Image: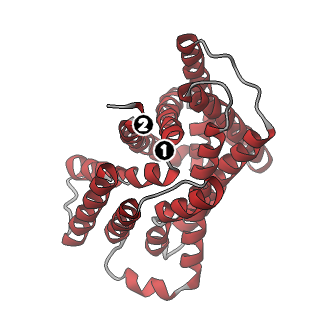
Amino acid sequence: MSIATLWIPFTIIAALGQVARNAMQRQLTGPLGTWGATNIRFLFGFPFSLVFFALVLSASGDHVPWPTAVFWLWLLLGALSQIVGTGLMLLAMNDRSFVVTTAYLKTEAIQTAIFGFVFLGDHLTVLKVIAILIATAGVVIAALRPGAEKGFADLKPTLIGLAAAAAFALSAVGFRGAVIVVPGVSFVTAASYTLVLGLFLQTLILTIYLLARAPDLLGKILSLWKPSMFAGFVGAFASQFWFLAFALTAAANVRTLALVEVLFAQGVAYYSFKQPLSVRELSGIALIVVGVALLVLA
């Protein structure tokens, strides 16, 4: 396997790690609330990103580059967009049209392709565009529930879903933009370097927000440091591989292949909770598999 194709296993590993991290965060949502559980991925992930970065520097012999103005602009776009996307997604969870909003949220891969082309000049072949469309259609079908069709007439879930997807798409493009402008180092060092500064920035922003809005929550977060530490490690581990993938290929390729996360999550639900799959869900999964296979082979 060549270096250029390493983005495929990197993305699959990242998707697996993300499924595990999401499961851990759900367990902490009860005692900490949604924003408290969200902050765990940043606050407890940051120390592990420093460890990863130290190991990479030791192995590569690279020197720590000084962040350029362009790097900070891309990093800010990635970090802030991810927080905004998370906020919009949490807003959708409290809305009765959450299922419809989630369907629109799955347009992230398509929007990533558009933003990647506009801002980074990322080129996608016709076959890869077709693969993105097929995989996205599969995720939307799998996400829908019976009776949700009525919600598509409402403007609110449409706007929330599309805006959240746009924020996550801009986040992927921003982080890729930051990784590829790090000068004079290997792609592994560039990815680790971007992860460290990205998590630091997000930890700082969310911690300030929680101190202003719910100062007692930080104490609760620290009191649950044992499960939070493991969740932070898994989150940083997954992010490390996301950024490695971003260093090697267009963000749209990464976010489309990342839709295998749906397959992993469905598998966990089936084997752990014995939740049966409907014909609609199986149809959506089949489209995801076809789309992802086309993307990898293109």
Q: As drawn, is 184 to the left or to the right of 266?
A: right
Number of labels in the image equals 2
Q: At x 61% / y 33%, what residue is drawn?
A: 195
Q: Position of residue 262 (x, y in %)?
A: 34, 55
Where on the picture, by quarter, is residue 21?
A: top left
Q: Residue at x 65, y 36 (%)?
A: 199
- Please state if 204 lies on the left or on the right of 91 as rendered: right
Residue 140 in the image: state x and y as whole percent. Answer: 38, 69
Query: Between residues 91 and 1, which one lies in front from this camera angle?
Result: 1
Q: Residues within 10 Å of mark 2 (few under 14, many from 20)?
A: few
In this picture, is 235 found above or below 294? above
Residue placed under numbered mark 2 in the picture = 4
Task: Please name the residue shown 41% across and 55% down the image.
Answer: 256
Distance from Cα at disc 2 to Cα at disc 1: 8 Å
Mark toward the start of the polypeptide (2 vs 1): 2
- The residue drawn where x is 49% and y is 39% is 248
In percent of width and height, residue 118 lies at 62, 61
Q: Which residue is mark 1?
A: 249
Q: Secondary structure at mark 1?
A: loop
What amino acid is at disc 2? Ala
Q: Is residue 137 left or right of residue 227?
A: left
138, above or below 68, in the image: below
Question: Mark 2–mark 1 contact, CB under 8 Å?
Answer: yes
